[in-house]
Image: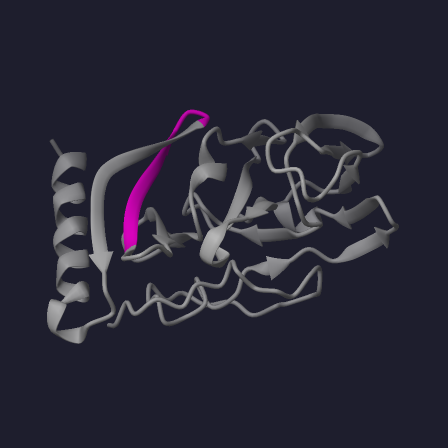
Amino acid sequence: MRFKFYYCLGLTVLLYNCNNKGGTTNYEQEVDSNPTTAITETHEENTVIVNCDTLQLKNSKATLYLFGSFEDEDSNNTIFMLTQNGKTIIHDSIISNRFKLLYKDFTGDSINDLLIHHYTGTRSNEFYNLYITDTLNNRLKRIKGFEKIPNPRYDNGYSLITCYGLTGTNYVKFYHIENDTILDYGITVEDDLMPENNFEERYQQAVNKIKTKQHQ
């Protein structure tokens, strides 16, 4: 199993239907093959509406309304609304510099969660807002701090949220969700893309260390 990086959340495709599914933990694959991009029902100049039935919230629609500028990375510029049977169940003000929504499981329960594009940083690092699906309470829950993680993915093999940061030296970090917040395990694996530096082996060592912590 190779972990050479090939992140998918930097896809330049905007709001198209993609039904590929998979179950790989390989960075060379596109994060579990492909997340499903939300199908657009309405796309006007400042508004996009998508059907969210795939989140197992039946008769639900997500609306993004841009009230600021896509270029503004420091101030909220977008209204995110989730309605179900015509009733508003979420009304958030967020930062988003692209009309891009993705469906992807980030909790390991085989139920899609919702990613809303936050912004694209230096070296094409992609950042997202995450709303996880809570079918018990029939709602979405926003995860605080997730928007600070570059190129996030969910490693199904180890039930871990990871990121792959593109910097002078690329790196992987590991996270978990506690209540409504993303928490960092404090472990970093650098990747200089040189085979002799055994990235795969060091990745596995990091995972083993995390698993040991989880069982203490």
Name the one closer to the observer, 194 or 122.
122
Q: Position of residue 117 (x, y in %)?
A: 60, 47
- Residue at (80%, 34%) from the top-left corner? 67
Residue in view at x 46 percent, y 58 percent? 123
Dividing the picture into quadrants, the one containing residue 82 is top right
The colour scheme used here is one colour
| Left or right, residue 37 beside residue 47 | left
**Count of numbered marks:** 0
Q: Quadrant of the N terminus?
A: bottom left
Q: Residue at x 62, y 46 (%)?
A: 55
Q: Which residue occupies the foreground of this view, 17 or 47?
A: 47
Residue 1 magenta: no
- Predominant secondary structure, magenta span: strand
On the image, the x and y values in percent for residue 102 come to 61, 53
Left or right? Give the position of 14 relative to 36: right
Residue 106 spot, x, y in % from top left: 45, 46
Q: Which residues are magenta?
A: 171-180
Quadrant of residue 139 in the image? top right
Q: From the viewer's perspective, is 160 left or right of 71? A: left
Task: Tell me: 165 left or right of 208.
Answer: right
Please state the horizontal and vertical placement of residue 174, each as a whole percent of the image. 29, 44
- Image quadrant in which the C terminus is located: top left
